[in-house]
């Protein structure tokens, strides 16, 4: 048992102030001595395993700002407060009607019990499930920089084929983040530099040679909301998740798709891929391959090939390339055929 101090700040500015005072690893929020906690379904897990060892926990659940717990819809924006629970967002009828992709990505994640506990901000900041990261006796550059990567030559069936580096091939396992990156979401942040906004696409960092630095947040940055733009086209959007079992499992491959169609012609496709990459993965090459085309099986397959051109398979995860392509093809055709 490692001792830690537990506090419940009363508002966001108090949380930022305490975090600023105690943060001692300025670039590494996930390793910092002080950490925020919301649903605790990810962080408490890693504390029990000895992977996360914060000295101070700041519980965000007592923050008094009501907007942190609200979903607001208007002027072409869905604004999710950071403490909204996954289950509440998944079950929101307006969100489901306006943009099914958001609801589906949440509904297919984790279990009902976890979705009732887990917050949206905590969800997008969840850490990898790489088995060698979770078991502290293995070398792991993400957990212990410079120690090596046991997954490279180990059993890497769950690992990523896109966005990998020579130092880390861990998959980003979240689902909601794939919807957010596909839809050009924005994150609202409060930190010691004041309030600011960040494109969701800039929140997570590729592993490169610093896989231990996972996001572009500072240790005292609190996410207060996530904003998602919507329009008529977002009704034609869909999340397809393929996994080892149909419930309570992370994606082996997934596809988040939103199609803006002019008759049968694709004006604009928005695509992200899950289960196959080290960070939430926007598939721009696939989007470009679809622009101006009439979507059929052949066009969808060409787009899926484009999405995986840069993929780097390892010994046990090469199957993710054909699986990821088939997942994207099916998601595209199912989205085309939606009755909206
Ligand atoms: C068995 C199991 C299966 C799962 N399956 C899936 C799945 O299929 N798909 C999926 O997407 N997820 C899955 N998950 C992950 C689960 O969804 C996450 O654990 C959960 O969403 C994390 O949210 P939380 O609020 O509990 O985060 P916490 O554990 O409280 O926090 C997680 C991280 O976010 C930080 N944080 C939290 N809130 C803020 C904030 N407002 N500002 C700044 N930092 C913040 C914390 O400091 C911490 O680093 C699964 C989890 C388990 C245990
Ligand atoms: S893949 Fe990344 S998280 Fe997993 S052992 Fe290697 S360095 Fe660690």
Image (tube, helix red, strand yellow):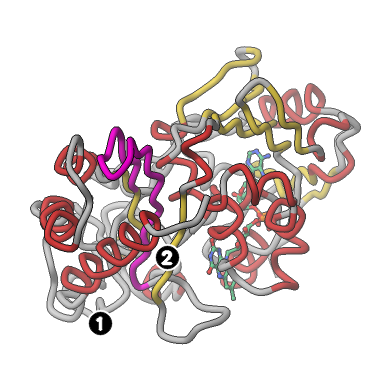
Q: Nearer the viewer, residue 277 or 242?
A: 242
- Residue depicted at 74% across the width and 58% down the height: 91
- Residue depicted at 75% across the width and 32% down the height: 72
Q: Nearer the viewer, residue 46 or 272?
A: 272
Looking at the image, residue 249 lies above or below residue 30: below
Instruction: State the residue lying farthest toward the bottom.
Output: 245
Q: Position of residue 304 (x, y in %)?
A: 18, 57
Instruction: State the residue lying farthest toward the front.
Output: 263
Q: Which residues are magenta?
A: 252-271
Instruction: Using the image, tell me which numbered label, if any, was put on residue 155.
Output: 1
Q: Image check: 132 left or right of 294? A: right
- Residue depicted at 25% across the width and 76% down the height: 156
10 Å crowding of disc 2: few (<14), some (14-19), many (20+): many
Residue 255 covered by magenta stretch? yes
Quadrant in the picture for residue 312: bottom left
- Residue depicted at 17% across the width and 42% down the height: 293
Pointer 2 and pointer 1: residues touching (CB < 8 Å)?
no
Q: Image check: 19 left or right of 24? A: right
Instruction: Using the image, tell me which numbered label, if any, was put on residue 240.
Output: 2
Q: Secondary structure at mark 1?
A: loop
């Amino acid at each position: 048992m490692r001792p830690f101090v537990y506090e419940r700040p009363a508002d966001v500015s108090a949380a930022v102030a305490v975090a600023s005072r105690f943060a001692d690893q300025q670039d590494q929020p996930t390793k910092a001595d002080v950490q925020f906690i919301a649903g605790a379904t990810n962080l408490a897990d890693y504390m029990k395993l000895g992977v996360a060892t914060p000295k101070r926990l700041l519980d965000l659940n007592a923050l008094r700002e009501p907007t942190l717990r609200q979903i607001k819809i208007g002027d072409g924006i869905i604004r999710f407060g950071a403490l909204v629970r996954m289950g509440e967002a998944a079950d929101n009828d307006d969100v489901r009607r306006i943009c099914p992709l958001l609801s589906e990505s949440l509904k297919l994640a984790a279990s009902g019990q976890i979705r009732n506990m887990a917050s949206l901000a905590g969800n997008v900041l969840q850490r990898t499930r790489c088995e060698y990261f979770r078991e502290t006796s293995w070398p792991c550059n993400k957990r212990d920089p410079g120690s090596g990567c046991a997954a490279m030559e180990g059993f890497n069936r769950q690992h990523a084929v896109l966005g990998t580096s020579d130092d880390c091939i861990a998959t980003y396992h979240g689902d909601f983040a794939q919807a957010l990156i596909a839809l050009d979401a924005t994150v609202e942040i409060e930190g010691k530099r004041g309030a600011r906004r960040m494109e969701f696409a800039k929140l997570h960092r590729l592993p490169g040679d610093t896989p231990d630095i996972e996001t572009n947040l500072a240790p005292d940055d609190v996410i207060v909301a996530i904003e998602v733009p919507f329009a008529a086209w977002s009704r034609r959007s869909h999340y397809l998740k393929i996994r080892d079992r149909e419930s309570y499992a992370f994606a082996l491959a997934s596809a988040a798709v939103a199609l803006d169609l002019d008759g049968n012609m694709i004006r604009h496709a928005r695509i992200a891929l899950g289960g196959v990459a080290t960070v939430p993965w926007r598939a721009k090459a696939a989007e470009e391959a679809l622009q101006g085309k009439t979507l059929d099986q052949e066009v969808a397959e060409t787009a899926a090939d484009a999405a995986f051109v840069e993929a780097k398979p390892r010994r046990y995860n090469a199957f993710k390339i054909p699986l990821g392509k088939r997942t994207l093809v099916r998601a595209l055709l199912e989205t085309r055929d939606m009755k909206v």
